[in-house]
Image (spheres, grey):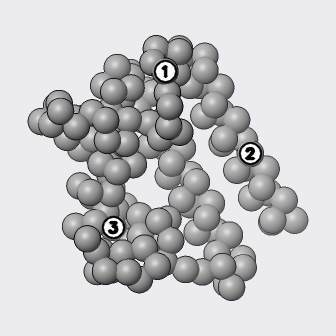
Amino acid sequence: MKENRILWIFNAVVICILLAALSSGVLAKEDIKAPLLTGKTWINMSQDQKTAYIWGAGDIIDLEQEIMEIYPELKRESFAAKAVEGIGDVKINDIVSIVDSFYKENPDKTNLSVIRVVWDTMIKPNIKSGIAGKPLR
């Protein structure tokens, strides 16, 4: 029963994110060649869209953590586990502000994905080892 609920929540989150992105016209503004959202799109998004993107990413991370609790054999040092370790209880608006600041201070780096910016500025400085226990680079 709990497994069905998790799958339903995951599907609902993915559908909401896709519908929001498509209906907002953000995806239509640039030709996206990679699946990751970059600063080129981020800097043109509204505050609500940025918040929704980070919220959705957080929901996916929470979902993976829940699945690993249900199925302990899936526990590993994944991106999700490192995100929880590195970010902790930082508020969504604070994450959005940090990403905004990064792109404002580094206009030549708008080709970097938002997830990469969050990793480099918020997660990596606060973890002891990288994904799968690999050394940090």
**Location of residue 136 with respect to 2 vertically, above or below:** below
The residue under the point 33% across, 57% down is 119
Q: Is residue 44 left or right of residue 55?
A: left
Q: How far is the residue under mark 1 from the one under mark 2?
A: 25 Å
The residue under the point 68% across, 69% down is 67
SS for callout 2: helix
Residue 8, position in %: x, y?
Answer: 79, 50
Disc number placed over residue 86 in the picture, else none: 3
**Location of residue 102 with respect to 18 vertically, above or below:** below
Split into 4 quadrants, where in the image is the N terminus?
A: bottom right
Do labels 3 and 1 touch, CB within 8 Å? no
Residue 75, position in %: x, y?
Answer: 60, 80
Disc number placed over residue 11 in the picture, else none: 2
Which amino acid type is shown beneath numbered disc 2? Asn
Q: Is residue 4 left or right of residue 86?
A: right
Which amino acid type is shown beneath numbered disc 1? Asp
Residue 13, position in %: x, y?
Answer: 66, 42
Q: Can residue 26 be seen in this snapshot?
A: no
Q: How far is the residue under mark 2 from the one under mark 3?
A: 26 Å
- Nearest the eye: 20 or 38: 38
Split into 4 quadrants, where in the image is the C terminus?
A: bottom left
Q: First in sequence: mark 1 or mark 2? A: 2
The residue under the point 47% across, 41% down is 36
* Comparing labels 3 and 1, the label whose residue is closer to the camera: 1
Which amino acid type is shown beneath numbered disc 3? Gly
Q: First in sequence: mark 3 or mark 1? A: 1
Q: Is residue 92 left or right of residue 71?
A: left
Q: Residues within 10 Å of mark 1 (few under 14, many from 20)?
A: few
Disc number placed over residue 52 in the picture, else none: none
Residue at which label 1 appears: 31
